Structures are given as structure tokens and as C-alpha cells.
Amino acid sequence: MSASDADPLIQMQNVDKFFGDFQALKNINLEVHRGERIVVCGPSGSGKSTMIRCINRLEEHSAGRIIIDGNELTDKVKDIDAVRREVGMVFQSFNLFPHMTIAKNLMIAQQLVRKTPKGQAREIAMHYLERVKIPEQADKYPIQLSGGQQQRVAIARALCMQPEIMLFDEPTSALDPEMISEVLDVMIDLANDGMTMIVVTHEMGFARSVADRVIFMDAGEIVEEAKPEEFFDNPVHERTKLFLSQILAH
Amino acid sequence: MEALTGWWDDYAWGSLVVAKVFLTSIGLMVLFGLIGAGAKLSNIRIAQKLAGAYTVIFRGTPEILVILLLYFGSAIALTSITQMFDPEVKFVDVPPFWAGTFAIAIIVGSYATETFRGAFLGVSPGSIEAARALGMSPLQTFIYIRIPEMWRIALPPFGNHMLSLIKDTALISIIGLNETLFVAKQAIATTNKPFTMYIFVGLIYLAFSSAITLSVMGLEKFGKRTTEGAR
Ligand SMILES: Nc1ncnc2c1ncn2[C@@H]1O[C@H](COP(=O)(O)OP(=O)(O)O)[C@@H](O)[C@H]1O
Ligand SMILES: [Mg+2]
């Protein structure tokens, strides 16, 4: 079953997610095509992380269907590993492996998952470290790097797996203000290269300049979905207006 | 000091026995600790209960009692089993080395159970998620991500467990293992110099424990180079 380029890369159909009795996602419908850049925003606890974590099955959805590049996410382990190889993820808290050098952080999954030989894995690692502009840090350990540098390493680590899709969960929220732009620059660069991206962020400047669509979530639902100009200049829903007024007041 | 003349080789052999017991019991202690921690972390109710009982019993009874019970208990059990096949047999002797080594490994293993469990839970969940998100299998994640983080967490208490083991080897003299304290008792019987002999045994144990402490410090330093920026 292989999907043609016209089919959506990501399809979420009527997806629900429960944590016990609590419903974190309510009837989520979302289609993302190849090369599209989606920004997801919404108040804390609205289900943004849960939604993107369902896409690479760090969370299992409770109902509905999720289809990634023609592969439906089911209980079958083989499918999950296949999907995870195609989907890169960047976390708010970087989540680098503390006991490995930067280079090793970038090589380990290539070697274990892609079975890339060591020398080649290192070359690929250095290529992406250059891309995020910190090749000179290759032999240091994560703790020795600034937050912005660590997050750029985390992006490079995901890129080393040559994913079709990149998911970002508030990649700049844990950063000191002066480091935010160095990470956003890398992401803009990636967007310009045509990467399919879903970015949970409250960086509205980034959303305006990069996003094809902005999605607003509240209480587990997608409340509004629009092109950035419409979203920021003419939001339809009251909840969106309220959220934007709070966010832009900062 | 001249009281020691003629006893050097006995002490050397005794020290060798201490070293053998220590090394064997480390292996067993790690095994018991891992099984105990695995059982506690599993979601099998009966395994959790058994592991709970294990830690309560062996952390809550005097070590010397465990050694005696294991030694005589296993001898009695072995004797009755053997008698089923050959009624002529009066008593089967269990080697004190094995009875003692097992006993101290089981005791210290009950402490190690908690150490390993804590280390497992202490690994940052973010690393584990990142590995899973990169497509690493649960086994790969365990081997390459969890274990390297775990041993750094477990090392300081593990060092203490090793010190417990080395000191507990002295207790095994009670069931007739010819380690250094056993040698000292014999030496005292002929030389009548208890203070000298016991001091000497103390020095031997200090040498062992210092070697352990230094090794652990070295390993900690190696582990910390990744977390403190010192290279
Ligand atoms: N593992 C979990 N167990 C129980 N509740 C959870 C879990 N993860 C998230 N939640 C709940 O689901 C809701 C949505 O969480 P999340 O997706 O993290 O929100 P957001 O990323 O938008 O801040 C929150 O109310 C949160 O408390
Ligand atoms: Mg979140």
C-alpha cells in the first residue's frame, strides 16, 4: 500500500483520546499534505502535545483512524516502527542522551535503526550539525552546550533519520529569550527546504511567516483552522479571539 | 609483630578466600537484585508480592542468622533428599564457601533490589521517549539509553553494597570457612596474641575496602565527565 503524492501525508479521522475518564482529544480531523507547514496553538492543557504525540504513537489514540503516508497506526509493532522512522520529533526539553557525545547522539539511532555503518553515520551526523551551525560541538556532551545549541542538536538528531515529517512540541518554550531565534532560524531553513512540519508554538511571528495553516485548539478540540493572515487578522471564534488577545498582550 | 611469623601464608590464603567469596557474591548479588527489581517493577501481582517479601525478610533479619539458617537448612535438605536414594547416608555436608556466599549475596541482593529499582525509575523519561521517537526498539532503548543512565544513578549505593559484601565475608568464618578471621582464631589459639591478630585482620579488610572505594570513585569520575562538563 503506497500513497501517491496527492494523498495526504498525515490523515487523522475522528480521533479521540482518553486518559482514563478524561477526554484529551475530541473528534480530531486533520489532513496534512507533503510540504505543508502547520502551526498548532492553544492554551496549556488543550491537547496540542497529545495530538502530535498520537502521530508518532508516543500516545495511542482511543478511537478514530490515523494514517501516516498510507500506513494506518494500529497495534502492530512493525507498523509503528515504520512510522517512527518517517516521523522526526523535537521536544520542549531537548531530551538529548546525557551520557553520549553530540556526535553519538546523532549516530546512535542511525546505527541501530537504519543499520547505517559507523563511518557513514558520523558523516551524516556532521552534515546535519553543519546545517544547524554547530559542527565544532560534535565531541562535547549535551550538558556543556547552551539550551539553544542543545535544541539545534535535537533537531539535527531527528533530521539524521531523514524523516518525511517533523513534529515540534513547543521547541522554544524552555529557552532563554536570546536563544529563541537561533532555533527558529533553523526551523525556517527547514521549512524553506520543503519539509513537512507540524509545529506547536506560541511564536506568532514564526506562524505568520512560515505556516501554511494555523490550527487553534481548546479543550481537546480543533476550534479554528485558517491561513495565518485570516487567523491573526480575522479570527472567527470567540475562544480564538480571547486566546490571541492574551498571547499578543505579552 | 613477630607473632605473625609463620602465619603469613595462612593469612594470604585466607585473603584469597575473601577475594573469591567477594567476587562470586557480587555476581550473585547483582543477579538477585535485578530479579528483585524486575519483579517489583513488573505488573505481575504475585511477583511484586514475592519481591516485597524478599526485601522485608532479608533486610529485617540479622545477617549471621541468615548464614546459619542457610548453611544448616541446606545441609538438612540435601541430606534428606540424598537419603531418599541412599538410606545409608548419615549427613551431607554443604561447602561453607557456597552456603556463605549465597547467604551474603541474598542479603545484600535485597538492598540492591531497591537500588536497581530506584535507578530504573530515576532515568529521565525524556531520554526514553526520544529514543522511542527515533524508532529504537524497546530492547535497544533499554540497552543503549536506560542502562547507561541507570548505572550512573546506581553506582554510589552499589559501592556501599560492595562494602557490605566484603565485610560480610568475615561472618562466614562462623560456619568454618577458612578466611582471614578464621585464620586469626587459629593463630590466637597458639600464639595467645588476640590483639595483634585481630588488628592484622582489620588491616586486611581495610585494604580490600579501600580498593573498592577507590574503584567506585574512579568509575564515578568516569560517569560524571558527561554530566559536569569536566573532561
Ligand atoms: N499521560 C497523561 N495522563 C493523564 N492525563 C494526561 C496525560 N497527558 C496529558 N494529559 C492531560 O491531557 C490534557 C492535554 O494535555 P496536553 O496534550 O499535554 O496539552 P497541551 O500540550 O496543549 O498543553 C491535559 O489536561 C493533561 O493534563
Ligand atoms: Mg504541551
Image (tube, rainbow, N blue to C red):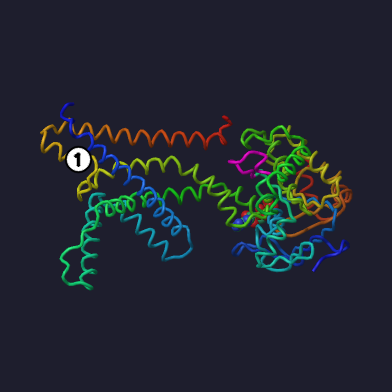
Residue range corresponding to the magenta coloring: A95-106
| Front-lying residue, A211 or B91 | B91
Quadrant placement of the N terminus of chain B: top left
Q: Relative to B88, does residue B12 appear above or below in the rendering?
A: above
In the current view of this chain or complex, which residue is farthest to the top? B1
| Front-lying residue, B38 or B208 | B208
Q: Pinpoint residue A220: horizontal percent, then vertical percent.
A: 71, 59
Q: Is mark 1 within 8 Å of ligand 1?
A: no
Label 1: which residue?
A: B183
* Residue A44 appearing in the image: no
Magenta span has B121? no
Q: Pinpoint residue A135: horizontal percent, then vertical percent.
A: 73, 35
**B5 on left or right of B20:** left
Chain bearing mark 1: B
Q: How many marks?
A: 1
**A135 on left or right of A208:** left
Tag 1: amino acid = Val
Q: Pinpoint residue B122: horizontal percent, then vertical percent.
A: 51, 47
